[in-house]
Image (cartoon, grey):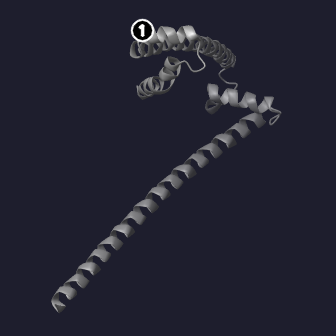
Amino acid sequence: MKSVGCGCLLYLVFLGPWIYMGWFVPKWLTAFANYVGFWKFSVGLFISLGIIRFMISAYFDNKKSAKARAISLEINDNIRDIKKLVDAIPNNFLPDPFKSYVAVTGMIDLVNDYRADSLKEAMNLFKQETMLDSILTGIDELRADMIVSQLMTLQAIRAAKEAADEANQAKWEGRFRNSK
């Protein structure tokens, strides 16, 4: 809503007078603005430009949403293909931890990236990577907890210092009053 208000203000302050005074504008447009009156012309032009802008943005938004729909359909097709692949695997072929879609796609990516040559190697590498990810996640959580505890400690130190400064100031003010 702010942008609309700013746009109105900028239009009425800059563009409206520019057109009304005839600077770099066709004479017939200036004559029409003089005939109708500045405020009516400015408001009408602002509304019509807003409608045109809305129509243009709606057109481009539709194009973007069509692209997004196409990408979404492609992703859904890939997911269906992966589900078919996982469902086609016999139950006793893979151990239980590797029967998920994430595990199968991860192992396929390892083979496609030439990081693993066999199923056994892909399973071991995938297991190592998932353990490493969980360790890194734990480290990130510990780091965040440490930062929070350090901030709390700093706040406590600052509060103690402020209390000590206030007590010291009160002590000196008391001595100053007693000396008079």
Q: Which residue is found at the position 67% from the left and 24% from the top?
A: 92
- 38 or 166, which is in the foreground? 38
151 relative position to 95: left or right: left
Find disc 1 in the rendering and name its residue.
36
31 relative position to 73: left or right: left
Q: Please identify the quadrant where the C terminus is shown.
A: bottom left
100 relative position to 120: left or right: left
| Residue type for callout 1 | Val
Q: Which residue is found at the position 32% from the left and 76% from the top?
A: 165
Quadrant assignment, res 93 = top right
Quadrant assignment, res 22 = top right
Question: Is residue 55 at all visible to an observer of this figure?
Answer: no
- 163 or 115, which is in the foreground? 163
Horizontal and vertical percent for residue 179?
Answer: 18, 92
Horizontal and vertical percent for residue 31?
Answer: 50, 9
Q: Please identify the quadrant where the N terminus is shown.
A: top left
Horizontal and vertical percent for residue 80?
Answer: 64, 14
Q: Give the class, few, some or many, for how many residues have Cα within 10 Å of label 1's Cα (few <14, many ≥20).
A: few
- SS label for mark 1: helix
